[in-house]
Amino acid sequence: MRWLITRAIVAGESMAPSLRSGDQVLVRRGGTARAGAVVVAMHPQQPGLLLVKRLVARPGQVVYGAALGADEFWLASDNPLVGADDSRNFGPVPATSIIGRMVLRYWPLIRSRRNGTAAASESKT
């Protein structure tokens, strides 16, 4: 059975300060996400690796002078100094790579002074 809501644990620093390493988030599978949403996606070049990135452009929108195809999304890190592993590196990702949209950061309850975010591990609960 595939749950509509799953959880992910953020690893790395690419989404700081929005999300940091160790943050736990709830992700709504499927559906559509608008530009600006944080999504969990499969890495297009490294099977099995999940990414937490900001969706910055949807199909038909223009990025760096080129229009995205009917099935393409552009993902970016919030912290580009450490988050080079995004669409600037591997290009647009197909819609089938998008696992879902983050709906809530639930842990830690109170933000501590920690660094970081980048990849995700999916819980099998």
Image (tube, grey):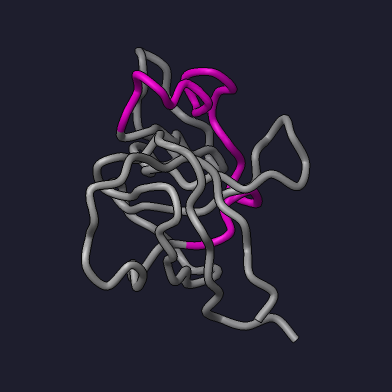
User: In the image, is residue 32 above or below residue 59?
Assistant: below
Which residue is rendered at x = 35% and y = 23% of the image? 80
Which residue is rendered at x = 47% and y = 19% of the image? 88
Q: Which residues are magenta?
A: 79-100
Q: Position of residue 99 (x, y in %)?
A: 58, 59
> Depth check: 10 or 59 in front?
10
Q: Position of residue 46 (x, y in %)?
A: 74, 34
Which residue is rendered at x = 54% and y = 70% of the image? 29
Q: Position of residue 119 (x, y in %)?
A: 54, 44
Residue 57 relative to residue 88: left or right = left
Residue 29 relative to residue 49: left or right = left
Residue 87 relative to residue 106: left or right = right
Q: Position of residue 28 (x, y in %)?
A: 47, 72
Quadrant of the rendering where the C terminus is positioned: bottom right
> Depth check: 87 or 107 in front?
107
**Which residue is outermost to the front?**
113
Is 10 part of what is drawn in magenta? no
Quadrant of the rendering where the N terminus is positioned: bottom right
